[in-house]
Image (cartoon, rainbow, N blue to C red):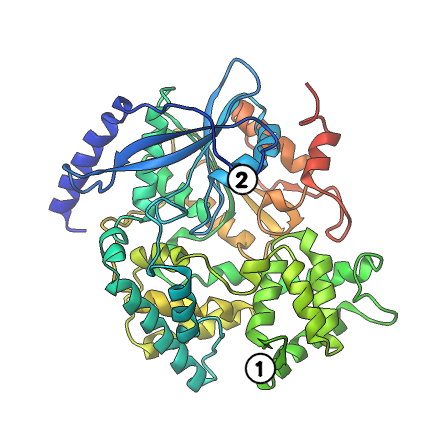
Amino acid sequence: MHWKRAILLFTFFGVCASQASAEKVAWGPCDLKDQPPLPVECGSLAVPLDYSDPGSDKLDLQLLKVPALRTPKKGSILFNFGGPGVGVRDVLAERGELLHGLTGGYYDLIGEDPRGTVDTLTASCFKNATDRAAAMTAAGLSVIATPEDAMALGRQWAGAGLLADSCFASEYMKENGTLISTAYAARDLMQVVDAVEEDGLLRYWGFSYGTVLGATVAAMFPDRVDKLILDAVMNPHEYYNDYDKQVWADADKVFSSVMDQCIKTPERCVLARKNTTAADLEKATYTLLDNLKREPISAQGVIVDHSLVKSFIRACLYRPEYYPNLAVGLDALFSGNATGFLANLAQQGGGEEAAGGVADEAVYAIPCSEKRTGKEALSDVVPDLGQLAQESKLIGDVGSSVALVCTRWQIEAKERYEGTFDVKTRNPVLVIGNTYDSATPLVSAKNISASFEGSVVLEHGGWGHGTLAHGSACTSRVVRDYWMNGTLPQPGSVCEPDYPPFNQGSLQQVLENIGFIGKD
């Protein structure tokens, strides 16, 4: 950003922020599909549609609040559960009881569906689901291509161009696709902070992509950070300036550990047979993927190839509760039962994600509008695709489609964050990374903590994506102490989960056992 333009923009942004208190949130009933475990309230907040334009129209942010359970109230905590592209309100309503247990019950818990998601400037390049399905089929982005397979890679490069062209041809996206950046979402968060009329300080808990948003808002407004948790960290340096390669760094290690836990829990894992080792299961899986790459199987009108199975594995690794289903699906494929695999695929928790389906284009439109790699040709990108596969032999190449689409994307965000993350926030940040997280490795948590002065990393020794995936009384106490008192753990602290990943357990049970929920 040119320095003169930056001064003008940031001067306006500062004025805009100071005027935010003129807006109020009128809370009322919610219209939700499912009854949440705790009472909720909904409201809307008008914020600038375009922060770079003083005469901008307004954008109505839709908010949901799970009111504080105890008094005196300590303020509000804002949330983002990841993506990019995941809505917040429905997830917050569903998890309100758990999150109140972890935060102490003295806060209002507030979420708004960020720009580009759900009904907030939805990142949609197509008029309807039929057009989208046809375009995605033509693009072929669900078929994973590697640098070694030049023909398949060339087709995926062309498919990425088809999608990028379709989005650029959409008048809706050409206008609104410039307004869904993380920087604008960060400014929206601060508008909410001002509108709830408390102390003007930010309290925020972000997961996965929500850590990019959290790191960005903390770097943009360091003096307004009261308490902030970055949980399951994506590397924000890569997010803005490179392809997201580090996210895959622990995936192979996690799969190895899951197979090891399978052998240790034969009553919950169908793959644990006599004289079978974890190494045997890993080898069989890689052999299966190689065979399906050369000779896919057709069943029930579906082609079961290595791309579909890799996406299935990726989705199953997100949560320990999916691990038994992962074992059932692989067991079916090892025996040549593609029909059984597809039946399991339809039932397992990662459903749509495992099948490679997307409801809209947010997963591409948000990051691609603000990612600047300096690369334009396929030949420029091939080395990076090779690094994706090196980060994870198992599923690293799943990230190739986003890399290729972002290279060909033509819609640029009005504002992208261009600063550093070497900042000192008003109060220190708590950073948490799982030991066995296939989507956000522990090293990313350590990297961002090195940037935020005074922050501390807690290693959550569990499996799955983020701390909510695997219950730990130790982690729960650390998190609650932070929200209640601002207390940070000792550097180098590790909290172990309360049950093995294949065993039937839950965070809900852990919180009940330690009295964080279910008791007055």
Q: Estimate the x, y position of residue 123 in percent, counting from the top left.
A: 35, 54
Q: Which residue is mark 2?
A: 33
Quadrant for the C terminus in the image: top right
Q: Quadrant of residue 12?
A: top left
Q: Amino acid at mark 1?
A: Lys
Q: Residue at x 41, y 47 (%)?
A: 118
Q: Residue at x 52, y 28 (%)?
A: 40
- Establish if 1 lies above or below 49: below
Labelled pair 2, 1 in contact (Cβ < 8 Å) = no
Name the outermost residue toward the top.
72
For the residue marked with disc 2, what is the amino acid?
A: Lys
Q: Position of residue 121 (x, y in %)?
A: 32, 47
> Number of callouts in the render?
2
- In terms of secondary structure, where does tag 2 sit? loop
Neighbourhood count class around disc 2 (C-alpha, 10 Å): few under 14, some 14–19, many 20 upward: few
Q: Is residue 423 visible?
A: no
SS assignment at label 1: helix
Q: Nearer the viewer, residue 410 or 148?
A: 410
Give the labeled residue for mark 1.
Answer: 293
Residue under the point 44% across and 74% down? 140
Res. 493 image quadrant: top right
